[in-house]
Image (spheres, rainbow, N blue to C red):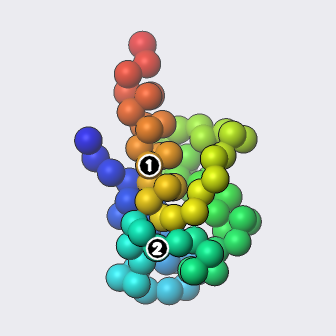
């Protein structure tokens, strides 16, 4: 299964103007200074890039890996859909 983690890291780095190598999957969004608006914008970008819909039901996203896991689940579900 491919992971969206590198894409999430790059989008967050670009959005927050920080080096991508300073972000890992375990990095907490709050530590990065990512507010809810930033997270929503990154999710919109991910929806467009991966052609998925996360929708309004966003779980409690605390880490970068949490976002990647959500995207990966949506991509997998889309691939399994008839």
Residue 30 is labelled as: none
Q: Is residue 56 above or below residue 49?
A: above
Q: Give the quadrant of residue 36.
A: bottom right
The image quadrant where one finds the C terminus is top left
Where does the image place residue 40, in percent across and percent down from the top left? 67, 58
Q: Residue at x 38, y 22 (%)?
A: 80
How crowded pointer 2 is (Cα within 10 Å; few <14, some 14-19, many 20+) is rated as some
Is residue 54 among the parts visible in the rendering?
Answer: yes
Q: How many marks?
A: 2
Give 48 or 73, whichever is nearer the viewer.
73
Task: Residue under label 1, please give it.
Answer: 69
Mark 1 neighbour density, 10 Å: few (under 14) some (14–19) many (20 or more): some
Eyeballing the image, is 30 above or below 80? below
Question: Does residue 72 appear left or right of residue 40 in this picture?
Answer: left
* Vertical order, 63 against 34 (above or below): above
> Residue 8: which quarter of the image?
bottom left
Q: Extreme left residue here?
A: 1
Residue at point 35% right, 64% down? 6
Quadrant position of residue 72: top left
Left or right: residue 53 versus residue 70 is right
Give me the disc on residue 27: 2
Asked if residue 10 shows in the view, the reply is: no
């Amino acid at each position: 299964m491919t992971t969206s983690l590198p894409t999430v890291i790059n989008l967050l780095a670009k959005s927050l103007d920080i080096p991508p190598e300073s972000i890992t999957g375990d990095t907490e969004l709050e530590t990065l200074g990512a507010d809810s608006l930033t997270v929503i914008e990154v999710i919109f970008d991910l929806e467009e890039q991966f052609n998925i819909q996360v929708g309004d039901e966003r779980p409690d996203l605390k880490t970068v890996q949490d976002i990647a896991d959500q995207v990966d689940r949506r991509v997998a579900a889309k691939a399994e859909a008839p």
